[in-house]
Amino acid sequence: MLQENRSTVLFVHGWLQSKLQFAEGAKRLALAVTERNYCVVDFEPLATVELPLFINQISPRIATYLAGFVQSLSAIDIPPEQVTLVGEGVTAHLVAHTGYILAGHLGSIIALDPLGPFYTVGPILQRPQFTLDPSDARFVQVWYSSIGQLGSPIPLGHQNIYVNGGLHPQRCCTCLTKEFGASNLLTQLCSHYFVVEVFKATLDPGTDLLATKCHSYKHFLAGRCPMYPTTRVTNDGTDAGSFYLQTSCKPPFL
């Protein structure tokens, strides 16, 4: 049950993903950080349609419904400014559309490797209101892990976090790269979803995410920037800029 007058985080699972994608992390946070509400948005029956259909018809419907739900929370003293939406891939843009409908009053958005094709790259692009940008919430944090393939190559947030440079292929996908090649869809999905696993590791209250604020990945690799902590899945951090972190291939990755 939602508690009144508390900041609230809504996890929106990805296309082709189930409601369980963020369930365990949300449960851990709910047990450990009791002064906030943590919820999982479930649209699993609609998540298995073809991608163009999901983008053009299903996603706008869910975004509109979600915006209405966020607005309804004001009845229990939770205004949009106290709400964080988390989405990945296509649903990173879905939650952005929700923020657009709410005229940017949403507290924060956490976007995990927002999809590039159909949104920021390619011959056919969605209208701006359907694509993530910093105006969609008071604070927009974006994570990247498959730039050059499925992920957007354009910085889309106030705070942009690049996992292993944000580049495809991620080193944890080496076996698939050797077997199928970097352009194979399985290899692309490996890089795309890796950032989700890294992010979920940060949902453990005992895990600290440390990244480096830096001008570029080249400067980061050269060790020319100091270590700096980034935010968790809350809207209490407002440091803008580009952040970089290197990970291992085994949980908790950081």
Image (cartoon, rainbow, N blue to C red):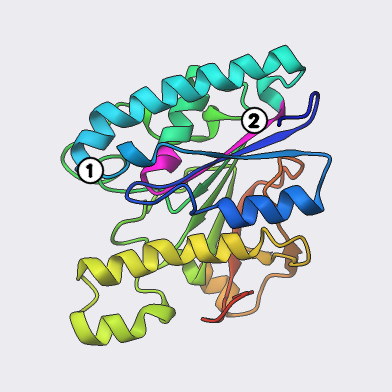
Tag 1 residue:
51
Q: Quadrant of the C terminus?
A: bottom right
Element assignment for label 1: helix
Residue at figure coordinates x 20%, y 34% from the top left: 53
Q: Amino acid at mark 1?
A: Leu
Tag 2 residue:
138
Residue at figure coordinates x 62%, y 65% from the top left: 201
- Taking the image as drawn, is residue 189 in sight? yes
Give residue 190's quadrant in the image. Answer: bottom left
Q: Is residue 192 above or below residue 247?
A: above
Image coords of residue 227 (percent x, y) = 73, 69
Residue projecting furthest to the top: 75
Mark 2 nearby-residue class (10 Å; few <14, some 14–19, many ≥20) = some
- Of tags 2 and 1, which is closer to the observer? 1
Residue projecting furthest to the front: 1
Image coords of residue 233 (percent x, y) = 67, 48
Q: Is residue 200 above or below residue 63?
A: below
Q: Quadrant of the N terminus?
A: top right
- Taking the image as drawn, is residue 102 in sight? no
What range is drawn magenta here? 82-93
